Amino acid sequence: MDAIEAVAIAPVGIDDAEHYRWGDACDGWHLLKLDGLSVIRERVPPGVSETRHRHARARQFFYILDGAAVIEVDGKRHALAAGHGLHVPPGAAHQFRNESESDVHFLVVSMPKSHGDRENVELAGALA
């Protein structure tokens, strides 16, 4: 068994996963970090959003663990509460936002990995 297979089958949590910070106050933990599949747990504090962007290759699924979020996809707002998720296909411009008054914790699953596959974009038109 090679090292990638060993990592892929080992239990992992935020206490022992690779951690990174993004933006001014957001946290991410790589629960599974493979070229073909990425699973990241993230925390976004109230009032924070990411830059609108798209991925040429990565298909993503966002799943809310705790809290509430808005994900705008191609100009349409999708409100998500804990226990709900949203698929974002490759090429779709999207932006994750925490418009609530508490932290939002979520999983983002990307296939293939989204790191290195990102283009920032401007929103054309008003939000639906």
Image (spheres, rainbow, N blue to C red):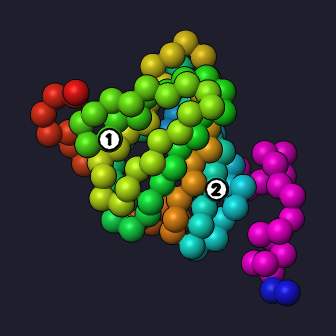
Q: Residue at x 75, y 78 (%)?
A: 4
Q: Residue at x 44, y 60 (%)?
A: 59
Q: Residue at x 60, y 61 (%)?
A: 38
The residue that disc 1 covers is: 73
In the rendered image, residue 17, in percent from the top left (x then y), is placed at 77, 54
Q: Is residue 84 left or right of residue 29?
A: left
Q: In the rendered image, which quarter is residue 76 located in?
A: top left
The range drawn in magenta is 3-19
Query: Does residue 94 appear in the picture of this structure?
Result: yes
For marks 2 and 1 on the same chain, the one whose residue lies earlier in the sequence = 2
- The amino acid type of the residue labelled 1 equals Val
In the rendered image, residue 109, in percent from the top left (x then y), is placed at 57, 54
Quadrant where the C terminus sits is top left
Q: Is residue 125 left or right of residue 51?
A: left
**Disc 2, SS:** strand
The answer to whether residue 76 is above or below residue 22 is: above
Q: Residue at x 36, y 60 (%)?
A: 90
Outermost residue toward the top in this view: 101
Outermost residue toward the front in this view: 84
- The amino acid type of the residue labelled 2 equals Val
Q: Check disc 2: other Cα within 10 Å, few if <14, some if 14-19, many if 20+.
A: many
**Disc 1, SS:** strand
Return the mark for residue 39. 2
In the rendered image, residue 18, in percent from the top left (x then y), is placed at 73, 55
